[in-house]
Amino acid sequence: MTRRYLFLCPDEKSASGGIAVIYDVVALLNKSGYRAAVIHNAADSGYPDYPDPVPMFYTKNMQRVYWRHARIRARAKIFRDWLGSRKKKLQLIDLRPTDVIVAPEFQVAEAIEAFEGMNIAVFVQNPFSLMTSCHRALERGFDPKTKVRFWFGIADVCQSHLNVLGLEPRAIFPVTMKPHEFPFHARKEKLITYMPRKRPWEAALIAEALVRRDRLLGYRIEALENMPRAEVAAKLSRTRIFISLLKHEALGFPAAEAMAAGCVVVGFDGLGTAEYFDKDVGVPVTEGDVAALITAVERTVAEYEADPSRLDTMRRKASERVNIRYSMSAFQTGLLSAWNQFNDILDNQGL
């Protein structure tokens, strides 16, 4: 019986780089001869902004585990979600002994409990969530070292976290934010943009302060939210300065997309994205220092209006860096190498 790789996936309907990556991985594995599918938690799920069809099913296993450990208020939400799943699009997955469950890092504990006795791998996109999830597993009596057969990560920061936790075997490969969809634009408007989703209160405070302090020299400021990917790309093509509000990231799509499009990126690197976001290609600000971010934006505006040459060189270098490091070809080569390694291990162990 052919082995299937079943990727557990959140049911989020809004834009999510992490969910898009899961879909990307499943799509590429299928194109490369593997059998892979996205596994949601409800029959009416599915990521709305993904361009290509991928095999999708749903499972009740994860919700049963969450129900088991939930308090009354959380159980009420789970029950409402169940009742809301009336428009059935997906088929319930029929699990087989040869299936491999690939869980996101924040569901290590739940996946081990929900799919007891099955082969489990973990796909780490956020190493900070991995730490809390592994701790939760240990509290419930599950040792990730013995319950998980393989660990995948997407960045240097994933490697360092897996290393200190002693989690092996593992493989790291770069994912792609599809930089070709955010082509470099040299000509820009006096426009500053930001994405408030990860840091809503900081975003509101920053925008208010920048307008109130009136040091933007004619630049306007605009939030990018609740818009499709193509519209975001169009906005970034006109944006001169992008405020990065990354938080606990391993890659951080918004800053990388803005760099690809030729924006000067100012702000937080999300702790994990220093592998591409540094002072050579942007204006990083100390994590959480909102006051420093506000003044950094104002200084960047002032410098650009006085002499744009240094910042123009920086943003071109930034675009070149993310286009090379996070290209589709780098993603494809890295993923298939990692998956071949994992598949060989399973074959050698007769699983």
Image (cartoon, helix red, strand yellow):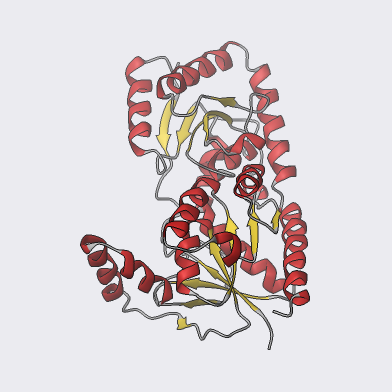
**Residue 139 placement: quadrant:** bottom left
Q: Name the side, left or right, on which 153 lies relative to 116.
A: right
Residue 257 image point, x, y percent: 59, 42
What percent of the width, then of the height, locates residue 50?
54, 63
Q: Residue at x 70, y 30 (%)?
A: 316
Check the image and name the residue furthest to the front: 141
Which x, y percent locates residue 329? 76, 55
Q: Looking at this rendering, what residue extends furthest in the bottom direction?
A: 1
Numbered-mark total: 0
Pick the front one: 145 or 272:
145
The percent position of residue 96, horizontal first and vertical second, equals 57, 85
Q: Classify the position of the N terminus by image quarter.
A: bottom right
User: Does any portion of residue 351 appear in the rendered image?
Assistant: yes
Task: In the rendered view, tell whether residue 60 sits above or below residue 75.
Answer: below
The residue at 74%/61% (across/down) is: 338
Tell me the quarter of the image containing the C terminus: bottom right
Judging depth in this view, the residue of 191 and 98 nearest the camera is 98
Q: Is residue 276 visible?
A: no
Q: Nearer the viewer, residue 60 or 108?
A: 108
In the picture provided, is 283 more to the left or to the right than 140? right
In the image, residue 338 sits, relative to residue 262, either above or below, namely: below
Front residue of 157 and 293 = 157
Q: Residue at x 50, y 55 (%)?
A: 134
| Side (left or right) of 102 relative to 347 | left
State whether residue 43 is above or below residue 49: below
- Residue 163 vs 261, above or below: the answer is below
Quarter where residue 23 is shown? bottom right
